[in-house]
Image (spheres, rainbow, N blue to C red):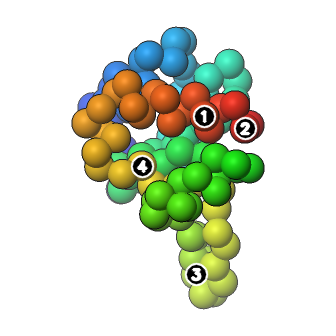
Amino acid sequence: MAISDSDIAFALELFEGLGPLTTRRMFGGMCLYRDGTVFALMRSDGELLLKAVGSFRDEVSAQGWDRWVHTRANGASTAMPYWVIPPALLDDPDEACAHARRALAEL
């Protein structure tokens, strides 16, 4: 399954308050970049995630965001530095951008 052009347009519109963004399709999903830094991605299932490291990781973990854990075919799992954006933020571009700014500050 691959993301659609409308999925990409949604993500760009959600984060347009950050200024110019670029995208790159990868593995059926895409990465979102601000000034060459990956701050978010959209998985092939259309789920949107923010990259969270440092104190921002601690913040989203405390807020109960779900962390992406990638499971390989052999059953091995790896916790990725990406966290699923809660549905409420997907309906609030200002708040989504505020969280993205915090993510970018840590990257």
SS at circle 3: loop
| Badge 1 vs badge 4, beta-carbon distance below 8 Å | no
Label 2 residue SS: helix
Q: Residue furthest top?
A: 19
Can residue 28 be seen?
no
Between the residue at mark 1 and the residue at mark 2, the CA separation in whole angstroms equals: 7 Å
- At 60% from the left and 34% from the top, the residue drawn is 102
Compared with residue 71, is residue 7 higher up or lower down, i.e. above or below? above
In contact (CB < 8 Å): disc 4 and disc 2: no
For the point 58% across and 81% down, which residue is it? Answer: 73
Q: How far across and how far down the image is residue 69, in percent? A: 56, 70
Q: Nearer the viewer, mark 1 or mark 4?
A: 1
What number is the disc on residue 102? Answer: 1
| 51 sits to left or right of 41 | right
What separation in Å lies between label 3 and label 2 (alpha carbons)? 32 Å
* Between discs 1 and 3, the one toward the N terminus: 3
Q: Is residue 67 above or below residue 6?
A: below
* Mark toward the start of the polypeptide (4 vs 2): 4
Task: Kindly check if marks 1 and 2 are in contact, taking CB atoms under 8 A apart as contact.
Answer: yes
Q: Position of residue 67 (x, y in %)?
A: 53, 64
Residue identified by numbered label 2: 106
Q: Residues within 10 Å of mark 3 (few under 14, many from 20)?
A: few
Front tag of 3 and 2: 2
Q: Label 4: which residue?
A: 85
Please, what is the three-letter code of the amino acid marked with disc 3?
Ala
Residue 27's x, y, as percent?
53, 51
Badge 2: residue crowd in 10 Å (few <14, some 14–19, many ≥20): some
Provide the secondary structure element on which disc 1 rests: helix
Nearer-the-camera pick, 52 or 2:
52
N-terminal label among 3 and 2:
3
Q: Which residue, given by chain and number where applicable, does mark 3 sit on?
A: 73
